[in-house]
Image (tube, rainbow, N blue to C red):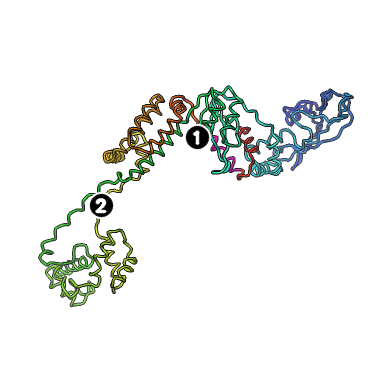
């Protein structure tokens, strides 16, 4: 029997000492456990005096986690001891079982730890939903209270710290996150991104040797004031990002240079001898002329095959006069006669105006019709539309569309060996037509080499070379880099960067949105620092 009790105790309370399982009752829905504490005495929480004098006993029913899908009802018999220290303000106190109960606690410590971990991972609503799924009835407010009751996290003193901003409300309110670059763990969150706040935090930790940051002025000022002994390192990704934005802006300023010269229109084909002889006004490709030529060829082909004109009439569904007309014409051009040929149109006097407006870029038929009516045009809108349709469908010289500034900036920013042959040729053409973009390409590739090979000592020479070219946007970037020269040189030389910080900024965004933006700073700070 004793062996069975010990096995039950090891199964139900594996890491808790001084507990004895009296009985276990299992049914379909619940597991009822009756247990008691076996310690000889307890320590008074008021004065710390050991006492073994029992004053009384009563049962406690702390909630516990489910077991195999069944809810657990724990009946724990606890004793009340009398404090033997006459000077103590407490006359009696209740024993607590380490790892199982706490004073005024309505849940076991393991259930409390489980709900706290769920709250750190999922916050209130989602945490309560998950708890209900696993068989723990709890409200979202209780989950948040358990997280809020956690002790303040201990902030270590890192040697290499990364600093960046995060938005609690984008565009309005920002905070600061600090990350230990060596362990890649967040060490603290600050409620704002002001330089004095960061300086005060750094001043309390004199062991910081390196501060990784972007090129924001408030971080630079805070790091200089709070940790003057530390080396400031500008992040390489931010440097390349700033250069990329500047390159795209510079290319956009020279978008005229991206236009490939338009080739001359091809010479019109020489008119066929029979067309010249007949003087036909209908060019090849006109619908009426093509239909006439096709019908003429069909009729003569049937005649040569031995068909009679009556048979052709039935086969092509033509009248006898139409078949006779096509059969008697030696060439299709003989049919291009009649009163419709070279007939004057009411639109002729306004075609010059329509051509000029078409050249200016106005191609809307209805708008052009409204413009020529006040000028005296009395024809229909359909005639104007047909005239413009002929212009719209006429063959035009085919020219290559110039590349966009974003595409050209991408060619400049990418490695030359990563470009396909067509992109290399296009970039070569652009550089040949625009000296400014040629100089920009050289500066970008020089900076890329300096960044990839960690040659920060080349930065002063690069800045001097940039100033000698007429590139205003690049001059602005160079001036900003020059003001933060030491940090940029360190960023282009040392192996440290702000990559882990950017990852935690994205994680903060996820946590903030998970709580619908209604979480306070203290709850957000605990979720960021305590969840592992």
Tell which of 432 and 67 is nearer to you.
432
Q: Position of residue 299 (x, y in %)?
A: 17, 69
Between the residue at mark 2 and the residue at mark 1, the CA separation in whole angstroms equals: 49 Å
In this view, 516 is above or below 154: below
Q: Position of residue 327 (x, y in %)?
A: 14, 72
Q: Which residue is mark 2?
A: 398
Image quadrant in which you'd find residue 361: bottom left
Q: Nearer the viewer, residue 230 or 100?
A: 230
- Magenta stretch, overall SS: helix
Which residue has dot 1 on it? Answer: 216
Is 429 placed above or below 198 here?
below
- Image x and y of residue 338, in percent: 17, 74
Check residue 511 for magenta coloring: yes
Q: Which quarter of the image is occupied by the N terminus?
A: top right
Q: Is residue 18 left or right of residue 170?
A: right
484 sits to left or right of 523: left
> In the rendered image of this protein, does residue 180 appear above or below residue 519?
above
Task: Give the residue drawn at x 35%, y 33%.
Answer: 467
Foreground pick, 28 / 397:
397
Bounds of the magenta span? 503-514
* Dot placed on the residue nearer the N-terminal end, 2 or 1: 1
Nearer the camera: disc 2 or disc 1:
1
């Amino acid at each position: 029997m004793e062996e069975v009790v010990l096995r039950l105790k090891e199964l139900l309370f594996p890491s808790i000492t001084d507990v004895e399982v009296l009985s276990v009752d299992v049914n379909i829905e619940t597991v009822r456990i009756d247990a008691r504490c076996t310690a000889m005495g307890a320590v008074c929480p008021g004065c710390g005096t050991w006492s073994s004098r029992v004053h009384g006993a009563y049962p406690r029913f702390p909630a516990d986690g489910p077991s195999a899908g069944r809810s657990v009802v724990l009946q724990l018999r606890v004793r009340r001891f009398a404090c033997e220290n006459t000077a103590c303000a407490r006359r009696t106190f209740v024993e607590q079982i380490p790892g199982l109960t706490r004073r005024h606690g309505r849940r076991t410590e393991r259930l409390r730890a489980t709900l706290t971990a769920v709250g750190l991972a999922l916050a209130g609503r989602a945490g309560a939903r998950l708890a209900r799924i696993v068989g723990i009835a709890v409200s979202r407010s209780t989950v948040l209270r358990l997280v809020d009751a956690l002790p303040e996290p201990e902030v270590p003193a890192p040697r290499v710290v990364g600093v960046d901003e995060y938005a609690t409300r984008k565009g309005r309110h920002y905070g600061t996150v600090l990350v230990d670059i060596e362990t890649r763990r967040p060490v603290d969150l600050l409620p704002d991104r002001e330089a004095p706040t960061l300086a005060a935090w750094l001043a309390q930790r004199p062991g910081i040797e390196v501060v990784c940051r972007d090129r924001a002025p408030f971080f630079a000022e805070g790091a200089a004031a709070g940790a003057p002994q530390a080396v400031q390192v500008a992040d390489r990704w931010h440097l390349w990002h700033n250069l990329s934005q500047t390159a795209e802006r510079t290319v956009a300023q020279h978008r005229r240079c991206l236009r490939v010269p338009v080739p001359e229109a091809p010479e019109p084909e020489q008119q066929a001898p029979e067309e010249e002889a007949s003087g036909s006004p209908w060019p090849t490709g006109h619908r009426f002329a093509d239909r006439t030529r096709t019908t003429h060829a069909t009729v003569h082909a049937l005649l040569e095959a031995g068909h009679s004109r009556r048979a052709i009439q039935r086969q092509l569904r033509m009248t006898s006069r139409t078949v006779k007309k096509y059969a008697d014409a030696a060439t299709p051009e003989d049919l291009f006669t009649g009163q419709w040929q070279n007939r004057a149109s009411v639109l002729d006097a306004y075609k010059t105006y329509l051509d000029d407006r078409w050249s200016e870029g106005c191609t809307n038929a209805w708008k052009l019709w409204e413009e020529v009516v006040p000028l005296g045009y009395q024809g229909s809108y359909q005639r104007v539309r047909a005239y413009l349709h002929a212009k719209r469908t006429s063959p035009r010289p085919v020219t290559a569309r110039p590349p966009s500034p974003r595409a050209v900036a991408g060619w400049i920013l990418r490695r030359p060996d990563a470009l396909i042959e067509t992109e290399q040729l296009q970039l070569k053409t652009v550089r040949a037509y625009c000296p400014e973009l040629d100089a920009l390409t050289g500066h970008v590739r020089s900076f890329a080499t300096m960044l990839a090979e960690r040659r920060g000592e080349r930065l002063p020479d690069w800045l001097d070379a940039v100033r000698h070219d007429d590139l205003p946007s690049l001059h602005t970037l160079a001036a900003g880099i020059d003001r933060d020269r030491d940090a940029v040189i360190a960023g282009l030389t040392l192996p440290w960067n702000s990559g882990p910080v950017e990852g935690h900024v994205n994680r903060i965004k996820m946590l903030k949105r998970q709580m619908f933006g209604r979480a306070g700073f203290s709850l957000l700070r605990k979720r960021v620092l305590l969840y592992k």
